[in-house]
Every structure is written in structure tokens, then in C-alpha cells.
Image (cartoon, rainbow, N blue to C red):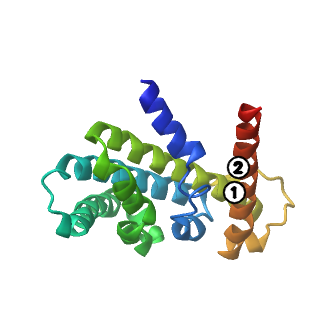
């Protein structure tokens, strides 16, 4: 159990794919104007990363090395297609809103990164937990950015208005450049918190 706790802590905090590894930030900047968009995108990536890592690990011993990357992309594509079909069938408006970003999950560096850095050299269950943790870490960052942007840009959270009448929306927060301001601030805060805890431990 402690082993899994360590994996989860690493994926969410100490080795967060967006905040620490600085990968997968394209979608983090593109879909974070609304919290609901970020939540759906994060869950889609978590589902894909967790199951892809599991099956890549499961098949690692019988996968020829010279076609390893091809097999990994095939597995990832399979789960992305499932997500895409699900959104189109049950959440058509969200599917339209997210547009090409769902399909681009296939090329997300987080998924390939976990596959190459962890899944190909660890047991399937561990890889499942690792992929899940990385996805949740990604989702939490997206939600943090999108909640700030939605409050300042629309005066709401998940579509529910929370700001009083007379609130003047920050137009910049609605536009893509808004994420360029919010994400680095969050990265800076987390980086300093993590480093501070490490310094305390060393003392």
C-alpha cells in the first residue's frame, strides 16, 4: 500500500507532469477557460493514460523492441477513440467544444512519457496506478488554472455565477493568453513549496 501511495504522491505532487516535468502544457493552455472543459479533458486523459500504461506494461515482454513505439501509439489511439466516441454519443456539446484537443490526446507527452519512463519497466498494476496518478495530477492543474480564469473572466465556477452584480470580467482571462499568466504563477508556487519541504527534510 505504501508503494502505491508513493506512486500517487509522485504523479500528483512531487513529479507532477505539468508543474514539475513541464509536459502536456499545450492542452493545459488551450482548454482552461472553463472549469467543466478542463474537468472533462482531464478525465479523458486520466482514463487514457491509466489504461494505456496498464496494457503497455502487460504486453511489454512480448512486444518486439523495433516496433515498441508503434504498439504504444496503437494502444493509446484505441483508448482515445473510445473517449471520442463516448463524448460524441453522450456529451455532443462538450465534444464539439473540445474539438481537436480530444484527438490530440494521442500525441500528449504525458501518456508517452509514462509509457516510456514507467510502464515498459514495471508491473501492470503499478503502471495503472502511475498512469492514473499522472492523469489526476494533470487534471488538478487544469482545474486550478480554469477555476481562476473562469472566476475572473466570467464571474462563475462550473457555470454557476458567484460574482456580484456589477462585476467587470477580465477579458484577458477568457482569451488563451490568460493561461500564460496563471499557469506560471501556479508552477512557481508549487515549485517553491516542494523545494521548501525538501530543504526542511535535509535539515
- Taking 199 as reference, is 77 above or below it? below
Query: Residue 6, how many percent across, how many down?
Result: 49, 34
Q: Nearer the viewer, residue 172 or 29?
A: 29
Q: Nearer the viewer, residue 199 or 72?
A: 199
Q: Give the CA distance from mark 2 to mark 1.
A: 5 Å
Quarter-wise, where is residue 19 in the image? bottom right
Q: Which mark is residue 28?
A: none
Image quadrant where residue 26 sits: bottom right
The number of callouts visible is 2
The residue shown at (68%, 62%) is 183
Q: Where is residue 100 shown, x and y percent of the image?
A: 41, 75
> To which residue does mark 1 refer?
187
The answer to whether residue 21 shows anywhere in this view is yes
Task: Give yes or no for contact between labels 2 and 1 (Cβ–Cβ under 8 Å).
Answer: yes
Tell me the element at label 2. helix
Residue at the farthest right position: 166
In the image shown, does 170 or 146 lie closer to the viewer?
146
Q: Which residue is mark 2?
A: 190
107 horizontally vs 134: left or right: left
* Farthest-out residue, front: 203
Residue that appears at 30% across and 57% down? 86
Question: Neighbour class for label 2 at 10 Å: few (<14), some, many (≥20)?
Answer: some
**How many residues crowd mark 1 within 10 Å: few (<14), some (14–19), many (20+)?**
some
Q: Residue 77: x and y, percent?
A: 27, 65
**Residue at (74, 56) in percent of width and height:** 188
Helix, strand or loop under label 1: helix
Which quarter of the image is occupied by the N terminus? top left
Q: Residue at x 50, y 45 (%)?
A: 11
Amino acid at each position: 500500500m505504501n508503494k502505491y501511495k508513493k506512486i500517487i504522491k509522485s504523479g500528483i505532487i512531487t513529479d507532477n507532469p505539468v508543474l514539475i516535468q513541464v509536459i502536456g502544457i499545450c492542452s493545459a493552455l488551450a482548454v482552461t477557460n472553463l472549469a467543466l472543459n478542463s474537468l472533462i479533458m482531464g478525465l479523458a486523459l486520466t482514463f487514457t493514460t491509466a489504461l494505456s500504461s496498464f496494457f503497455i506494461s502487460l504486453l511489454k515482454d512480448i512486444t518486439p523492441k523495433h516496433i515498441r513505439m508503434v504498439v504504444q501509439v496503437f494502444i493509446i489511439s484505441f483508448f482515445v477513440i473510445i473517449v471520442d466516441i463516448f463524448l460524441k454519443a453522450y456529451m455532443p456539446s462538450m465534444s464539439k467544444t473540445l474539438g481537436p484537443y480530444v484527438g490530440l490526446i494521442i500525441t500528449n507527452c504525458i501518456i508517452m512519457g509514462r509509457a516510456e519512463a514507467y510502464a515498459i519497466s514495471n508491473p501492470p498494476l503499478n503502471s495503472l496506478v502511475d498512469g492514473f496518478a499522472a492523469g489526476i495530477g494533470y487534471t488538478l492543474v487544469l482545474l486550478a488554472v480554469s477555476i481562476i480564469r473562469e472566476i475572473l473572466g466570467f464571474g462563475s465556477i462550473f457555470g454557476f455565477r458567484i460574482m456580484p452584480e456589477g462585476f467587470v470580467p477580465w477579458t484577458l482571462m477568457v482569451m488563451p493568453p490568460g493561461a500564460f499568466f496563471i499557469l506560471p504563477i501556479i508552477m512557481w508556487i508549487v515549485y517553491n513549496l516542494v523545494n521548501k519541504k525538501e530543504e526542511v527534510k535535509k535539515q
